[in-house]
Image (cartoon, rainbow, N blue to C red):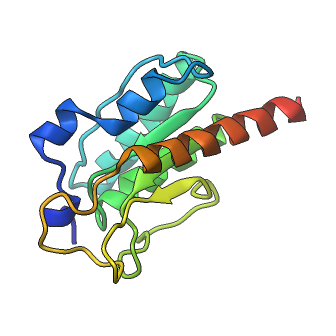
């Protein structure tokens, strides 16, 4: 399992990243930055990158984080760990990830309630069509709306 043709983001997709476009054009959110993290092979390193990413967000005093992944399967380990590490630190987190019907998260935790499935195929599976299961602006607006809701709920708990 891992990145397949339909979940692979093309260079053009990266240059016209819908998440960056949606968040940077929203007047309610202040885009602090973008952190790119690879997917290590070793589980120890997977835990490290997720923890370091969360520590970085905490040090920047981020009010919330949207995390995205263009992989699944083994990549879920880092993705879900990063969500958990952000949640443990009290940082609201939402995200975008290919889940579909067959490729549900290989590991789970309580901080995955704001993840938007970017699956577009009719049967919910990874396909051979390049870029078919990429995030689009609507997916990003959903993740952003969920983040705003989680941030508002956290503010109301104070």
Q: Position of residue 139 (x, y in %)?
A: 45, 50
| Rendered image quadrant of residue 43 | bottom left
| Rendered image quadrant of residue 130 | bottom left
Q: Taking 34 as reference, is 135 above or below it?
A: below
Residue at point 39%, 36% (across, down): 19
Q: Position of residue 151 (x, y in %)?
A: 71, 34
28 and 51: which is toward the camera: 28
The answer to whether one can see residue 31 in this image is yes
Q: Quadrant of the N terminus?
A: bottom left
The answer to whether one can see residue 4 in this image is no
Residue at point 40%, 48% (across, down): 47
Q: Taking 66 as reference, is 26 above or below it?
A: above
113 and 149: which is toward the camera: 149
89 and 4: which is toward the camera: 4
Residue at point 29%, 37% (across, down): 37
**5 sits left or right of 126 in the view:** left
Q: Position of residue 126 (x, y in %)?
A: 24, 74
Q: Position of residue 116 (x, y in %)?
A: 49, 56
**73 sits left or right of 145 in the view:** left
Q: Quadrant of the C terminus?
A: top right
19 and 106: which is toward the camera: 19
Q: Taking 76 as reference, is 85 above or below it?
A: above
Q: Taking 74 as reference, is 82 above or below it?
A: above
**41 sits left or right of 116 in the view:** left
């Amino acid at each position: 399992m891992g990145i397949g043709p339909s979940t692979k983001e093309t260079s053009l997709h990266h240059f016209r990243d819908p998440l960056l476009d949606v968040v940077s054009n929203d007047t309610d959110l202040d885009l602090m930055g973008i952190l790119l993290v690879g997917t290590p092979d070793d589980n120890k390193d997977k835990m490290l990158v997720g923890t370091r990413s969360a520590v970085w967000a905490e040090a920047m005093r981020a009010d919330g984080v949207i995390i995205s992944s263009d992989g699944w399967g083994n990549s879920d380990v880092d993705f879900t760990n990063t969500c958990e590490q952000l949640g443990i630190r009290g940082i609201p987190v939402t995200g975008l990830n290919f889940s579909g019907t067959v490729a549900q998260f290989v590991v789970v935790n309580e901080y995955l309630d704001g993840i938007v499935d970017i699956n577009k195929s009719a049967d919910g599976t990874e396909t051979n069509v390049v870029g078919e299961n990429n995030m689009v602006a609507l997916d990003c607006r959903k993740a952003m709306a969920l983040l705003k809701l989680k941030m508002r709920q956290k503010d109301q708990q104070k």
